[in-house]
Amino acid sequence: MACRCSERRTLLKAAGAAMLKGDVRGAGAQVSAAGRTLAEDARSGALAKEARRLAASKLTLRRR
């Protein structure tokens, strides 16, 4: 299972847009969904895997 960071970003942007429209309940639902995906990624280890991948790419860039 891959990290769903882009999905969370989309959900949080939608929550911000809903807040601007005054739709507090819709914004809450979007934030709740983003929280669920974050919890699922943390349980599955996808966040740790993504962090290791990013750290390795940072080291590679630093060496060049």
Image (cartoon, grey):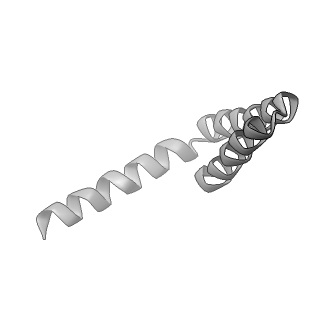
Number of numbered discs on residues: 0
Query: Residue 47: image x %, image y %?
Result: 53, 43
Q: Is residue 42 above or below residue 59?
A: above
Task: Name the one closer to the observer, 38 or 34.
Answer: 34
Q: Farthest front residue?
A: 21
Query: Residue 10: image x %, image y %?
Result: 68, 52
Task: Name the one closer to the observer, 17 or 38.
Answer: 17
Q: Is residue 1 visible?
A: no
Q: Farthest left residue?
A: 63
Q: What residue lies at 66% left-to-right and 33% top-to-bottom? A: 39
Task: Name the one closer to the observer, 8 or 13.
Answer: 13
Q: What residue lies at 79% left-to-right and 29% top-to-bottom? A: 28
Q: Is residue 18 visible?
A: yes
Q: Is residue 52 left or right of residue 28?
A: left
Q: Farthest bottom residue?
A: 64
Question: Considering the image in quadrants, where does the N terminus appear?
Answer: bottom right
Q: Quadrant of residue 54?
A: bottom left
Q: What residue lies at 73% left-to-right and 45% top-to-bottom? A: 17
Q: What residue lies at 38% left-to-right and 49% top-to-bottom? A: 52
Q: Quadrant of residue 6?
A: bottom right
Query: Residue 26: image x %, image y %?
Result: 85, 36
Question: Considering the image in quadrants, where does the C terminus appear?
Answer: bottom left
Q: Is residue 20 left or right of residue 6?
A: right
Q: Is residue 42 left or right of residue 19?
A: left
Q: Is residue 10 above or below residue 47?
A: below
Query: Residue 46: image x %, image y %?
Result: 57, 47
